[in-house]
Amino acid sequence: MKHARLKAAIPIGLFVTVGALSSNPGYAQAQEPQCTLKTLTGRYVFSLNGTLMPPAFGVTQPTWASAAGFHIFNGDGTGTSVVTFRLAGVTMSQDSASALTYTVKSDCTGSYTVSGGPSFDILVAPDGDSLAEIATAPPGIGVSDISQRVSRK
């Protein structure tokens, strides 16, 4: 009699265990992130280092470059970039402010272009606290970084 109860209990235990596991929503059912222009709002600091290749910024040979500054994204596709740029150890511009325009798609990818300067593809964190960026223009510029939001204004 004990064995009969045990044999009956095993399928019931499996049913309850499998049922409990299958009722738990999985990753495939998770909601995809949704980004908009407003996802990027505020001040983001960045620092870039890399080698520029001709013809980027007029260099004729591989040249070390670095930049640091911040971007202010207004939440509407416009903003400002403030940058100090060094080329081959020489400061080319210091705290130079330029307008920028940007796009953000619902899948949190996008791009931005600094007026008179480089362009970048971006991957935005769904909460807008950071973004990864990689230069796409001009030809010969090959830098990337992670920019972090430091202020919502």
Image: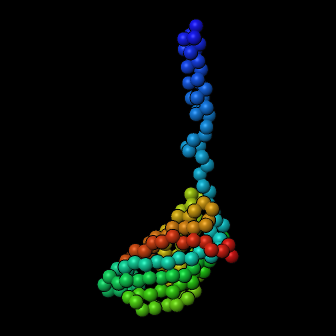
Residue at the left extreme of this rendering: 61
Name the one closer to the observer, 76 or 83.
Answer: 83
Pinpoint residue 62: horizontal percent, then vertical percent.
32, 82
16 sits to left or right of 120 = right
38 sits to left or right of 3 = right
In the picture, the quarter occupied by the C terminus is bottom right
Quadrant for residue 76, please give it.
bottom right
Quadrant for residue 45, please give it.
bottom right
- Image height of 14 relative to 24, above or below: above
How does the figure colour the protein chain or chains? rainbow
Residue at 52% across, 90% down = 94
In the picture, the quarter occupied by the N terminus is top right
120 sits to left or right of 99 = left
Residue at the top extreme of this rendering: 1
Residue at 54% across, 14% down = 7
Pinpoint residue 102: horizontal percent, then vertical percent.
57, 71
Residue 100 can be seen, yes or no = no
Count of number-bearing discs: 0
Name the one closer to the observer, 67 or 11.
Answer: 11
Residue at 57% across, 79% down = 70
Pinpoint residue 52: horizontal percent, then vertical percent.
37, 80
Residue at the front extreme of this rendering: 2
Residue 94 can be seen, yes or no = yes
Name the one closer to the observer, 8 or 131.
Answer: 8
Residue at the right extreme of this rendering: 153
- Image height of 4 relative to 53, above or below: above
Pinpoint residue 126: horizontal percent, then vertical percent.
60, 60
